Each structure stands twice: as C-alpha cells, then as structure tokens.
Image (cartoon, helix red, strand yellow):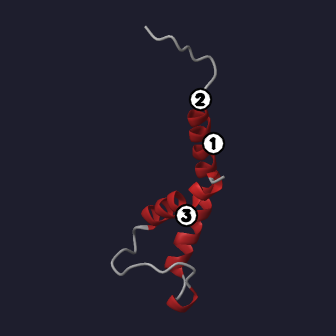
Amino acid sequence: MSLMTRHAPSLFSLERREYRLIYALSFPLFFAVALLSRLLPASLRPLPFERGRFFAVLSDARQTAHSVLPFAFMR
C-alpha cells in the first residue's frame, strides 16, 4: 500500500500534455517548410535534404519538430 496519494497531476504529466499541444500546433508549420524545401530549386531551399529521400517529408517534419520543440521547455 502506498502512503503517497496523488490528487493533482504531476508536473511531468502537465509538461507532457503541453509538449503534445505545442507539437500538434507547430507540426503543420514544420510540414509546410519540409514540403517547400522539396519543391524549391536547390539554391533556394531553407532545409537541405539527402538524395533519395524525396518522399520522406513527414519524417523530416517530425524529426525537426522533435529537435526544435524541447528548447521551449528549457529553463
């Protein structure tokens, strides 16, 4: 039996919920930039991409979101 009772959500679960919300709101922006980087000529691309990965737009957008969004939670 546990002596600790939890009535309020923990700080970790609140931050996880906030991260998911920010991710859901910003993912379309990252997707649009990844798609735009595929359609523009190589000299105008905002993000470079590797050869042979033309259809990995979702993967690139997901990877960019997961690498950029943690900076919003730094203190």
- Crowdedness near tag 1: few (<14), some (14–19) or many (≥20) residues, C-alpha within 10 Å: few
* Badge 3 element: helix
Instruction: Tell me how far mark 2 sits from mark 3, CA to CA.
Output: 31 Å
Q: Quadrant of the N terminus?
A: top left
Determine which of the numbered discs, if any, sits on residue 10 in the image.
Answer: 2
Judge whether residue 21 can be spotted in this image. yes
**What residue did someone put label 1 on?**
18
Q: Residue at x 43, y 62 (%)?
A: 59
The residue sitting at the top extreme is 1
Q: Are marks 2 and 1 in contact (CB under 8 Å)?
A: no
**What residue did someone put label 3 on?**
31
Q: Residue at x 36, y 74 (%)?
A: 53
Q: Position of residue 31 (x, y in %)?
A: 55, 64
Q: Nearer the viewer, mark 1 or mark 3?
A: 1
Determine which of the numbered discs, if any, sits on residue 40 in the image.
Answer: none
* Badge 1 element: helix
Q: Position of residue 13 (x, y in %)?
A: 57, 34
Q: Position of residue 47 (x, y in %)?
A: 53, 78
